[in-house]
Structures are given as C-alpha cells and as structure tokens.
Image: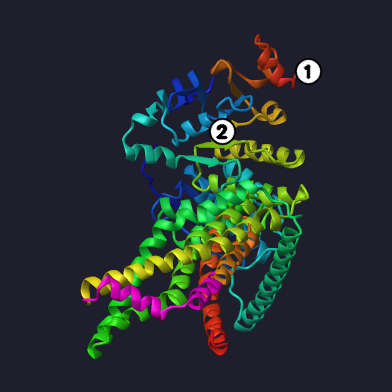
Amino acid sequence: MTEPASTAMLALRQKEGRLHVCVGGDWRIATPQRPTVGEVILALEESRIDQVVIEDGGIQAWDSALLLFVEQLREYCQRRGIALDCRALPEGVRRLLTLATAVTPTTTARTGGTPGWLERVGLQTLNLLDQTQAFVRFIGETALALARLVRGRARFRLPDLWLLLQECGPGALPIVTLIALLMGLILAYVGALQLQMFGAQIYVANLVGLGTLREMGAMMTAVIMAGRTGAAYAAQLGTMQVNEEIDALKTLGLSPMEFLVLPRMIALIVMVPLLTLYADLVGLLGGGLAAVSVFDLTVLEYVTQTRTALSFQDLGVGLIKAAVFGILIATAGCLRGIQCRRSAQAVGEATTSAVVSAIVAIVVADSLLTILFTRLGI
Amino acid sequence: MAEPHIVVRDLTMAYGDRVIQRDLNFTIGRGDIFIIMGGSGCGKSTLLRHLIGLIRPAKGQILYDGVDFWNADPSTRTALLRRIGVLYQSGALWSSMTLAENVGLPLGEYTDLEETEIMALASLKLALVGLKGFENYYPYEISGGMQKRAGLARAIALDPEILFFDEPSAGLDPISAKRLDDLIVELRDSLGATVVIVTHELPSILAIGTNSVFLDAERKTMIAQGPPRELLHHADPKVREFLTRGGTL
C-alpha cells in the first residue's frame, strides 16, 4: 500500500557560478505542496550561473514527480546552455532520464494549436472536394456493380442477401406498424378538427389517404429505415473496415462493392417500397380508427370516400419515392461504412453521419420529386 | 528467492461449466520478470485477466502482498488496481483521444495534479517509450508498434508496482520486439517494478524471463514452473518441445 506522503524538500545554494540544488524527502506525485522547477528557474534567471549541480539531500521516496522535476530542469538548462550535473540522483532516476532522452523528438511532431480561420476554410474546402470525389467514385462503382448484376456476373453470396432482406424487411414490421398507425391517427385528428368547422369531416378520408400514399407513408418508412438499417449498415461495414475484413476481400480479388454494398442496396431497394405499401395500409387504418371512433363517420363512409379520393397513380408516386429513398439510405449507410477509418470512434462517427446524411437526402429528394410530379401533373 | 509479490493459490479458471485451468499454484517474486507461457488456447490471457481483476476465479485466491484481491472490499480492490499497469495485446488506446490524453487520463483520475502538470508527465512518459513529439497524434495515425509503446506509456503513467503485458511482441518485427524487451527490462530496473508477461515468443521468454509457469491445454493445469532457461531441460517433453520449437537441444 502507498503510505501517506510526507514532504518534499528543495534547498538552493550558490557558489562560484554554480547553483547547488539539494532535493530530499518524499518526491512522489501524491506528496502535497511539492516544490516546482519554477523556483530553481527563478534563481537561475536572477544570477549568472554556469552549472547546476543536483545533490541528494536525503531522498526517501521518489516517482515520476522527481523525474519530471529533473527533466524540466534539464530542458531549461539545455536551452540556456547551462551544464547540469545529475550524478548524485538515485540510479533509477538517472536511467529513466537517459531513456527519456534516448530518442530525438520526431521531426513530424505536431503542435496542439488550432489552425487559423483561413486555414480552416482551406481545410474544409479540401475536405469537401475529397468527400465529393469519394461520393462520385462510390456512385460510379455501385453503378458498375449493378450493371454486373444485370448481366448476371456480380459476385455475392445469396444467403447474405436473404438474411439482409429478412433483417430490413420483416424485421422492421413492428416499428413500421406502430409509427404508421399513429401517423394515420395524427393526420386524421389534425385534419378532422379543422374540417369539422365546415361540416366537411367526410374529407378526412381524402386528407389521410392522399397524405399517406403520396407523402407520409414513404417518408416515415424511409426515416425509420435510415435510423434502423442505414445506421446498422454503416456500423457493420465500419467494423469490417476496422477488422481489416474489407482488405481481406480486396486481397482475395473480391469487390467489396459487389460482395457487401450490392446486397445491401438490393435489400433496401426491394424492401423500402414493400414496407411503404404496408405502412400506407396501416396508415389508412389508423386514420379510419380516428375518423370512425371520434368524428362520427361510419366505416362504409370512410372506405367509400377513400376509394373515391385515391387512385393507383397516388400509390405509384409514393412507391417511386420509396424506391428512391431506399437507394439513398443504402448509399448513405454503405458509403459512410466503407469510408470509415480504423478506430472505434470512427465507427460511431460513420453511423451518425449515415443517419444524418440519409435523412437530409430523403427530405431533399422528396421535395424535388414532389415538385417534379406536380409539374408533370401526376 | 525474491520476496513474494503475487501469490496464486489453488486457482481454477472456468467459463460457466467449462474449466480452462485448474489447481494453479505459483508465486511471483518482487522484481521478477515472470512469464506465463503455453500453447495457443491454453488460457494464458485468461489467467492474465484473472490476475488484473477482470474475471473472478471459479475457485482459489490471488494475493497481492498477502491481500486476497477477490475477497477484499471494493475500496481495497481499487487501491490494488491503482498499483498495476497493463499493456494489452493491441495497445487498447482510446481512439477518440490523442496519445497525451490517453496517458494523461489515469493521472487525471487518480491524482490531484493540475492539467499542465498532467500533460508534462504524459509527455515525459511518452518520451520514456521513445514517442516524444507524438503527443498530439491520434492512435490511428501511428503504426502498430508505436501504438504498443504508447500503450506502455499509459501503463506506466501511475508508476505502477506491477506491470502486466499481454503478448507484447506479437505483430512486431524482431528488432522492434528486441527493443521492447530491452525497454521492459529497463523499466523494471529503474522503476523497481514486478513484470508479468503473457507470451509464446521464445526469444523474449529466454532473453528476459527470470521465472515462469507453463500451462497445458490438454491437462488443463500447469505442468512446469521455474526460470525459462532451466525449463529447457524439463522432464516433460511437451515443455522441452515448446522451448526448443520442436527441435532438440
């Protein structure tokens, strides 16, 4: 056990251009109120000293605290061209000092300072260019992999694809059900409260139907999948990067784009529209529940009005959006995973980045597609 | 024989019902460089994890200076852990921190030092392992060998009495491995620490080991103990074969 620390002693004495530094007592990190090297430096600044001689004034115990004191003094003396005599120190301290100075500091040593604003702007710009280049390369490689798939020459394991389909499809049903049902309920509630003022609550079916099929079904499903599956893809691929599994694939001549990215891409392109179709039905059901139970519509009225209001075109718009969202989620997840550096922190960053990029991309793409479909009169 | 520092008494290690090793009895003397050796899968690293308090033994005792680690109260256990330093096989540096922050973290947790003094000490520890100037680098920016040395700097941050090494030379070239061995001996001599090393690197075992124990996966117990060079002539052919790479003396 480490016994309670006593005191560390430091005495300075000048004689014929020499400063005698006498250290004694308990020189350990736990020792309270240890003298600092500043006291010696002050004495050295005040008078002309050619040599510093460290003397053992009865050192009872020591650890890194004494070592740091001597090392800081040595560095100061070296800068000022003052000779330092450490021969009186315990042998262990001398050996460690030799060890600490055995290797010259690396010439690539980095300072801890933060760069100026102009440098930061430059670095950010370069980073943005790198990111854009990596993104374009990823898209290109994915397109090539898809082309090989179409020609039946892509190499990946079918069992992996089935597993991925299972994970991102049926595995997501409970959460999609809950969110879609509540989304339908909320749409019905918010809409019906306003429509009721005009006695037009029958049109809640139009609101829920069009809102769900054209927008919210696909959007909510995509957001769920971005948080659930996109993040998982980034974490899986990032961890594979850390464990050198991706390097192993490359050295075997297997393309990570075909072997890892392609099945994930297919899984999401297939499953997001299917889940959206399911979410649409559950959303309509949720809206119907609210309309029938709270706003005095009959089931028949709600169903009839929904059938009148909706067309297969509306369903198609939602499903096209869902397919696009699937591509975006898979791209964000796989791109961030593949770009991941080799550390645990980088995996976390890749996962977060995958979710954020996917959600931003989904919202932007949804806006563009909505404008496009409106212009086309669809 | 040196004064006993760590005593392992009737230790049985198991994962659930699966016994890894049983009836381990050995003593690690103060100032020893103690080697835990044996073939792959015999439980060397598991034994190390028992010694550093990560796994509770299925049976038996581990005594540090006579204090039974696993039957001690939590505060005593924390105090005992404060006296040990561990270098993990991969270095196990925290990736979100610079090397100086990695080394400085235990100092910040266990001492009342000012931040500037912590960073100065971290820099000194990095200098001791030949990494002066790399304070602001992140682990992923340096090589595997450098990560190991940085891990060693972190292990000696609190001036431990006992240093544990898990496969320190694994993945290093022979020259780097030799330098690390020299560094271990130098740190042992200057810090006065006891060193426990898990390894199956023969050059290291024979060059720096002062005492050792040999674990056998088949018999699930230790089959030899003593200075590694003496074990070259051990009665058990398995021990001799291991220490001579299957060749003859």
Packing grade of label 1 (10 A; few <14, some 14-19, many >=20) is few
Residue highlighted by disc 2: B195
Residue highlighted by disc 1: B247
- Number of numbered tags placed on the structure image: 2
* Residue B44 in view here: yes
Mark 2 to mark 1: distance in Å?
29 Å
Q: Nearer the viewer, residue A324 or A44?
A: A324
Query: Is residue B168 highlighted in magenta?
Result: no
Pick whichever of labels 2 and 1 is earlier in the sequence.
Answer: 2
Packing grade of label 2 (10 A; few <14, some 14-19, many >=20) is many
Residue A73 x, y percent position in the rendering: 58, 58
* Residue A357 in view here: no
Q: Nearer the viewer, residue A182 or A62?
A: A182
Query: Is residue A307 highlighted in magenta?
Result: yes
**What is the chain identity of the residue bearing mark 1?**
B
Q: Residue at x 32, y 72 (%)?
A: A287
